[in-house]
Amino acid sequence: MPKMKKIHRQHIHWKAEEDEKLISLVIKYNKRKWRNIAAEMGTRNAKQCRERYFGHLDGIDKHPLSKEEEALILKYRQSETDNGWARIAAIINDTFKTKRTANQIKNNYNQRLRKQLEILESQKFHEII
């Protein structure tokens, strides 16, 4: 069987005008009917519109995470239970009355907190020995 060629789509950044149009359509359709929103956008599909709105435009807190938020992330990543990023984001949002995305939490952990956690675990290991 011949190999299928992969189609690579070009990543096109969102323009401010598109964001404004998306916001007005989301208001018009009450955060529903993403196919209709995409059809009226004309340049994006329903998934792109939904992800852009909920991931970038819907009141997301883009300030750096507080020390308290970071401590909570470390606590839940260290726990025995399986806490995915979406669950940790929900806990942080409920605890601190903020709006953080799972992606923000994951990126913060991978960029800043993972090394701190490794150091803590290493120190605990050396204390045991």
Image (tube, helix red, strand yellow):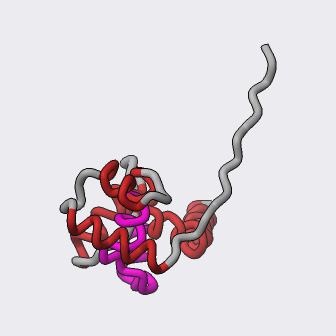
Counting from the top left corner in percent of width and height, residue 109 is at: 52, 68
Q: Is residue 75 visible?
A: no
User: How many discs mark residues in the rendered view?
Assistant: 0
To which quarter of the image does residue 128 belong?
bottom right
Residue 53 magenta-highlighted: yes
Q: Is residue 115 left or right of residue 43?
A: right
Q: What segment carries the magenta color?
A: 50-74
Residue 125 in sight from this viewpoint: yes
Query: Does 56 sit above or below residue 29?
Result: below
- Residue 125: image quadrant is bottom right
Q: Would you say residue 69 sits in the magenta stretch?
A: yes
Image vertical order of residue 23 relative to residue 103, above or below: below
For the residue pair 52 and 15, the one nearer the viewer reads as 15
Taking the image as shown, residue 126 lies to the left or right of residue 99, namely right
- Quarter in which the N terminus is drawn: top right
Magenta span: chief secondary structure: helix
Residue lying at 23% horizontally and 54% vertically, measured from the top left: 32
Find residue 46 and report its horizontal and vertical position in percent.
40, 51
Q: Quadrant of the C terminus?
A: bottom right
Q: Residue at x 43, y 76 (%)?
A: 70
Q: Position of residue 106 (x, y in %)?
A: 49, 64
